[in-house]
Amino acid sequence: MLIHGKLLGALLAIALAGSVALLLAALSGSRADPESGNAVVVQSPFGLYGPGTLDQVPASAGREMIKALGMNSLTAYQDYSLGLVKELGASWVRIDFNFDGWNFAEPSDFLTKLHNAGLEVVACIRPVNNFAPADLTVFQAGLRGLVRRYPWITVWQIGNEPNISWENPDEYPRFFLAGEQAVREACPSCRIALAGVAAKYPSQSNDGEALQIYDRIVGEIVKQAPEGSRPFDIFDLHYYGYYGCAGDIVDSIDSFHQLLARHGVDAGTDFWVTETATPTGRPAWPWGSPAQTEDQQAAELVKRFTVMLSAGVSHVSWARPYENYRYQDNAGSFYDYSGLVYNGLGREQAAGVKAGTKKKAFFAYRTLVAKTSGAVRIKRLNWGQYRFTFKDGRPPLYLLWSETSADMPAGLSGPVTVTDMNGKQTQTAASDVILGSMPVFVESRPAV
């Protein structure tokens, strides 16, 4: 997420880096009004950001991560990470391609393994210096070659979070337009994603500044794009922050829809969230971070994903499956603890936590994907009440939680099966279900 690291660290990271498929997922690109409770069509699966990559950690930290797992190579770590992705049931991943001014870092063997596993790869193009080169011809030539080398990658994202990582975000439109032109020349049918917005990150209280910066960015891109063209097909939002922020996401999504509408590019633009996460424990950065439990992380994952889907976001992705270590060479930060699997280093090692230990959020993600597999529609009934429907005739599935006492949704009565986030099932009566802050899946079952 946050890119304030030193150039040396980035270059070392690049040097180091040198399906239950088609399960539930995200939604159509059509705009949904979450407050009206209109149902949203389910089309695409959940994803993960950055599995098997060590781009944002120092080389020495990456070696420690691999060693802690009992491995001796980046290839072994990549294979292990691919196994985690498949176990979770994700069917797409975002992989970053860093550009150093001359060449792109591309983990070609790992990309082939991802493709062979049936996973869709979303490619994010990132300049390591966080500014556009003065001469973009080398960049464009390299990007055209990259696109042609991977004809099965059909979504290309140009840049990442210019509102917090670029020295001058107003330089981003020039970089984007050069990248967009190169991709469309090499692959006219490919889809283009605008650089993800750092809409909510740990040290930020609201997304007002992000809206202002992206208002200028989108306005300039639309102004310079050929008349009648669509400069980008996908608008990406990134949400970090702590337990309890799921409700804020709906308002933020709506704000960015309004921004695009002002510039005439909202209709037909697909909304994605390729980065979202919250940590376990108490991060050392930002100062004053709250301590969070595994239960809170797991609940927040399920709530955020569900809220995003019901608000019309079409792809959602957790960052990352495995914990970072010394992310951006900043030990113990928010981003070191937001993964779904412990790295077993630092304070975790002192506490006896073994590298590779899966958190409750890992199993919550897996349960969410498995339970909603085959769903074709999601409808928000009320806050904390969502209904998934299936075209194969099976009973609707309800995902429910409540911060206070709440009644069961209308139409859900009689004998039910309740599945918790670990996948444990209980047979009971709907009238006996007591909702709490931890989401549960409830579905009707025939009376015996």
Image (cartoon, rainbow, N blue to C red):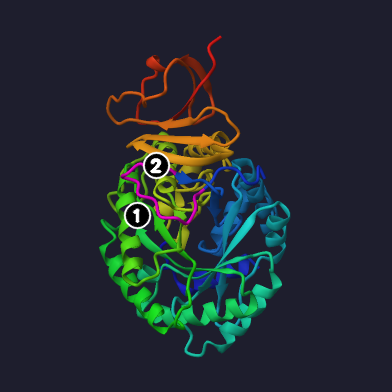
Three-letter residue code for mark 2: Gly
Determine if the magenta segment contains residue 386: no
On the question of residue 69 being in view, the answer is: no
- Is 135 situated left or right of 400 in this image? right
The amino acid type of the residue labelled 1 equals Trp
Q: Which quadrant of the figure contains the N terminus? A: bottom left
> Which residue corresponds to the image point at 39% horizontal and 74% vertical from the top-left?
166
Residue drawn at point x = 56 percent, y = 89 percent: 137
Question: How crowded is the residue under tag 2: few (<14 C-alpha within 10 Å), some, or many (20+)?
Answer: some
Instruction: Verify CB contact (< 8 Å) between mark 1 and mark 2.
Output: no
Q: Secondary structure at mark 2?
A: loop
Where in the figure is residue 338, as x and y percent of width and height? 45, 48
Q: Provide the residue span drawn in magenta.
A: 26-39
Distance from disc 1 to disc 2, alpha carbons, whole Å, reads 12 Å
**Residue nearest the observer in this picture, 243 or 9:** 243
Is 182 placed above or below 153 here? below
Number of numbered labels in the structure image: 2
Question: Which label sits on residue 285?
Answer: 1
The percent position of residue 231, horizontal first and vertical second, equals 47, 75
The picture places residue 10, in percent across and down from the top left corner, at: 51, 70
Quarter in which the C terminus is drawn: top right
Using the image, determine if residue 423 lies above or below residue 310. above
Q: Main secondary structure of the magenta part?
A: loop
In the drawing, does residue 90 fall left or right of residue 117? left
Q: Between 345 and 152, which is closer to the camera in this rendering? A: 152
Q: Nearer the viewer, residue 226 or 407?
A: 226
Read off the residue under disc 2.
Answer: 281
Q: Residue furthest top?
A: 448
- Count residues near mark 1 (Cα–Cα under 10 Å), then give few for <14, some for 14-19, many for 20+: some
Secondary structure found at label 1: loop
- Please state if 210 lies on the left or on the right of 158 as rendered: left
